Amino acid sequence: MGKKSKSTQPTLSWADAPAEHDYPAAVSFLRLIAAPALAESLSSLLSQAPLVHQAAKDILRAARLPLLPADDPEVAKDLKKVSKGTPLSPVLLVRGELRPDRALQIADGYHRVCASYHLDEDAEIPCRLVDPPAVSA
């Protein structure tokens, strides 16, 4: 799957902040891999975290997730948004091993990461990135 030429590919644009509905979506996912209280805490931390930028290829690699195909319904929906010039919502990431096999969790935005990768694997994606709170002994 080669890169499209820069002249024919749509320009990725990003919103200044994640959409409000991204946080409940993140909690819904995180509750599957962490205790509910931790999921809520992480969502709160994500809502306050500054934006950082990470390459699409690095996010997928750190999360150990496969690239979804461009015709995946949600990826296709995001690619259509890009072609219309609609800004995508920044992604929500949790660093650290909430699961023993992953150093990074995409709490919300996996499809947006994949859509970005299809346009440019080096695309710098705005993210809110947090570490889990320290566990007191």
Image: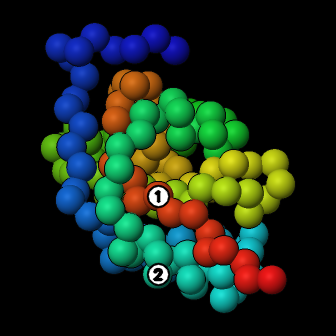
Q: At which x and y percent is residue 25?
A: 51, 73
The local crowd at label 1, few if under 14, some if 14 to 19, many if 20 or more residues have their Cα within 10 Å, is many
Q: Residue furthest bottom?
A: 37
Q: As displayed, is residue 83 above or below residue 130?
A: above
Q: Nearer the viewer, residue 62 or 67?
A: 62
Q: At which x and y percent is residue 84?
A: 18, 43
Q: Which mark is residue 129?
A: 1
Q: Amino acid at mark 2?
A: Ser
Q: Nearer the viewer, residue 45 or 125?
A: 45
The residue positioned 62% from the left and 79% from the top of the image is 39
The residue positioned 40% from the left and 14% from the top of the image is 3
Decide if residue 116 is in sight here. Answer: no
Q: As displayed, is residue 114 above or below residue 126?
A: above
Q: Nearer the viewer, residue 39 or 112?
A: 39
The local crowd at label 2, few if under 14, some if 14 to 19, many if 20 or more residues have their Cα within 10 Å, is few
Q: Earlier in the sequence, mark 1 or mark 2?
A: 2
The residue positioned 74% from the left and 57% from the top of the image is 97
Q: Which residue is mark 2?
A: 44
Q: At which x and y percent is residue 31?
A: 69, 78
CA–CA distance between discs 1 and 2? 12 Å
